[in-house]
Image (cartoon, rainbow, N blue to C red):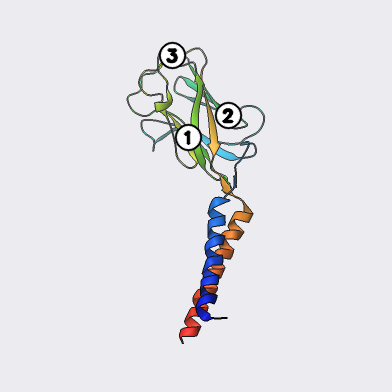
Amino acid sequence: MNCNLYRALIFAIAAVSMCLTASTAAASTLSTLDGQSGSFSIYYPDTTTVFAGPSSFTVGAGQEAVLNAGNITWSLDISGLSLTFGFNDSGCCTSFVAFAGPVVTFTDVGFVGLDSVLLDSTNIGGFDSSRVSFTDNSIYLNIAGGLDLQNQREVRLTVSPAPVPEPATLSLMLSGLGVLSFASRRRKSAAA
């Protein structure tokens, strides 16, 4: 077989393998947070200063965590992909000037990260999705600015974990890289 034709065939196989990897990159996601470990903390006056907690938890039946900080009782309940934050202020109205609020951090080594966090519902006037932020493994709720937290207020969020590539996708990608590596070595040995 002609050497150039052989090289072209190898590169074509590698290219097809890489394209199949990209086009069939099926991914699975977690359908529940059950069994995930994490911590629940209250931060004030900024996102780097822990005011109360952390309280460690493993997601399962019932409330995951309850913290008392100042006049506010904070609670966290996780079910499936839904997180419910409870607030009960025994004083008047909460009036913070900087970031203040709960932070949930998932600590499992196998946790794949968060793709999105959506505000489902709240009974706190003035609380909207601009007060919710997240990183790969943490969710922040900012209640700064005088929100009324009396009488059992709550915020309910739905999370979407980041997708995880299927093993078949990874094997296709690795086989494509292997073919490219083989072709590269073959070319070097033919040149020598």
Q: Residue furthest right?
A: 61
Q: Give residue 45's position: percent from left, percent from top.
A: 36, 30
Front one among 99 and 174: 174
Residue occupying the far left of the picture:
97
Disc 2 marks a residue whose amino acid type is Ser
Measured Cα–Cα span from mark 1 to mark 3:
26 Å
Q: Residue at x 36, y 33 (%)?
A: 46
The residue tagged 3 is: 91
Alpha-carbon span between mark 1 and mark 2: 12 Å
Residue 22 lies, with reference to residue 188, above or below; the image says above
- Taking 190 as reference, is 178 above or below it? above
Q: Earlier in the sequence, mark 1 or mark 3?
A: 3
- Whichever of callouts 1 and 2 sits on the residue coming sooner in the sequence is 2
Q: Could one spot residue 188 in this view of the protein?
A: yes
Q: Position of residue 160 (x, y in %)?
A: 54, 36
SS at mark 1 in the image: strand
Answer with the quarter of the image where residue 176 lies: bottom right
* Left or right relative to 175: residue 42: left
Determine the secondary structure under disc 3.
loop
Residue 54 visible to the viewer: no
Q: Nearer the viewer, residue 57 or 16?
A: 16
Residue bearing mark 1: 139
